[in-house]
Image (spheres, helix red, strand yellow):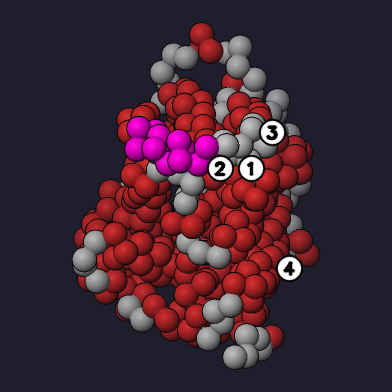
Amino acid sequence: MNQKLKITDVIALGFMLFAFFLGAGNIIFPPLAGQLAGDHVIPTMVGFLITAVGLPLLGIIAIALVGGGWDKLTQDLPKKTATIIAVLFFIIIGPAFAAPRTGLVAYEMGIKPFLDVPSQTQLTLFSVLFFVVAMFFAWSQGRLLDVIGKVLTPVLFIGLAVLSVMVFLNPQGDILAAQASYIQQPFSTGFLDGYNTMDTFASLMFGTLIIEALRSKKITQKAAVTKYVIYAAFIAAAGLALVYISLFYLGATSNSIASGLDNGGAILSVYVQALFGTEGQLVLSTIVLLACLTTSIGLISACSDYFSSLTPISYKVWVVVIGSACALVANVGLTQLIALFVPVLFALYPVAIAIVFLTLVRSRLPNRALAYRSVVLISLLFALIDAAKAVNIDVSALNFLPLFDYGMAWMLPTLAAIMFMLIVPKKVDQGETELSNQADNNVEFEAL
């Protein structure tokens, strides 16, 4: 059987993954971070690129190496624990936060500027229409490559390319001094800003869609699947990096025309109008609507695929359920939605990172079950400290922890645990290991 893709299909696969990633958070956070970072924009951007491009790239590579989705990634965790973590991840990137945010940003940046008197009714009508369209495209899961990779993304990419070139050719101001935490901690602040894209979560979910798209093209052998998934990951990562660099530079040079704005979307809107005039809003609206729509399609499809594997309810029914829930949650409002879920991101993002790192070194782990259980638990416990700090709970007694002041208390303990697990002895008695699994299951389930 021929296990090769045409070059156009490989590019389309990478474009599809790029479009899935490039959504609401990817557009609204870099301009504000760039403006606040000012003359510290480079270290801030590097930190952001690590969490918003590097980690998602590693996540997709991890998916490729294990040759499957979430079940393969977490095969060394207790089944119940893996399911609980997955459900939390899918709820966050699906109906609770990331997917509704795509509809909100699409409305705020793509539609609202054209309305004389914006109202809640208009937001409600738009969110319903937006997610009906997203559900329509997500309905036929096997056609995602043709619809997203070959039709919607090229139009999106052209719009972004035009914007990126113009930002560097015609910057709208000088780069000023850094502000707030970007003065003393530009790298770590940018690193944490990258959490907001939630793309490390998404990479663990979108990997399944990439594999499904390959299967629709009759690519089923593990070696071929691994190769093409990695190709797609690098294409998507390159596209994301170029977009982020231009948006950071846009923000850094925006103070003279958009000073004092507290929303990256508003900064972007003002900047584009300065670049292109009144027609600029139409360019921006096209970019935002397509970026948000393609991401919402990917999120709805990924969530529906996972929940249909857990329940007797079919994929298409889940598409309707999740799409409807997204339309409902989108009416909460963008600012409230972001504030509500920031602590959740601080708590769970390190867990996703830990699973990615473990998967990358899985073949070198002498005792995989112990490694996955220990490292995931350690990452969660220390991440909860950062989450508590994010909601202003007094945890100053723990300020002796490395990187505590930077909001990354989880990092060194997690990395140290992984390093230790690379040298921990392998259990000799396999029968004893199997007998202890159920007890360990219960302990880990309660702990998580």
Name the front one of labels 4 and 1: 1
- Residue found at the very far top of the displayed protein: 397
Q: Is residue 67 above or below residue 406?
A: below
**What amino acid type should be assigned to the residue bearing mark 1?**
Leu
Report the label total: 4
Q: Give the Cα distance between marks 4 and 2.
A: 47 Å
- Kind of residue indicated by mark 4: Val
Q: Which residues are magenta?
A: 429-440
Mark 3 lies on a secondary structure that is loop
Do tag 3 and tag 2 residues touch (Cβ < 8 Å)? Answer: no
The crowding category of the residue bearing disc 3, from other C-alpha atoms within 10 Å (few below 14, some 14 to 19, many at least 20), is few
Q: Is residue 128 visible?
A: no
Residue in the picture at 29% in, 65% down:
308
Nearest the viewer among 315 and 94 is 315
Judge left or right: residue 405 versus residue 391: right
- The answer to whether the residues at label 3 and label 4 have Cβ atoms under 8 Å apart is no
Q: Position of residue 411 (x, y in %)?
A: 61, 31
Q: Position of residue 62 (x, y in %)?
A: 60, 56
Q: Residue under circle 3? A: 423
Where, by quadrant of the figure, is residue 136 drawn? Answer: bottom left
At 56% from the left edge and 82% from the top edge, which residue is drawn? 219
Q: Are marks 2 and 1 in contact (CB under 8 Å)?
A: yes
User: Which residue bears the numbered disc 1?
Assistant: 365
Does label 3 or label 4 sit earlier along the sequence?
4
Q: Secondary structure at mark 1?
A: loop
- For the residue labelled by badge 4, is the local secondary structure a helix, a strand or a loop? helix
Q: Is residue 152 left or right of residue 447?
A: right
| Residue linked to disc 4 | 165
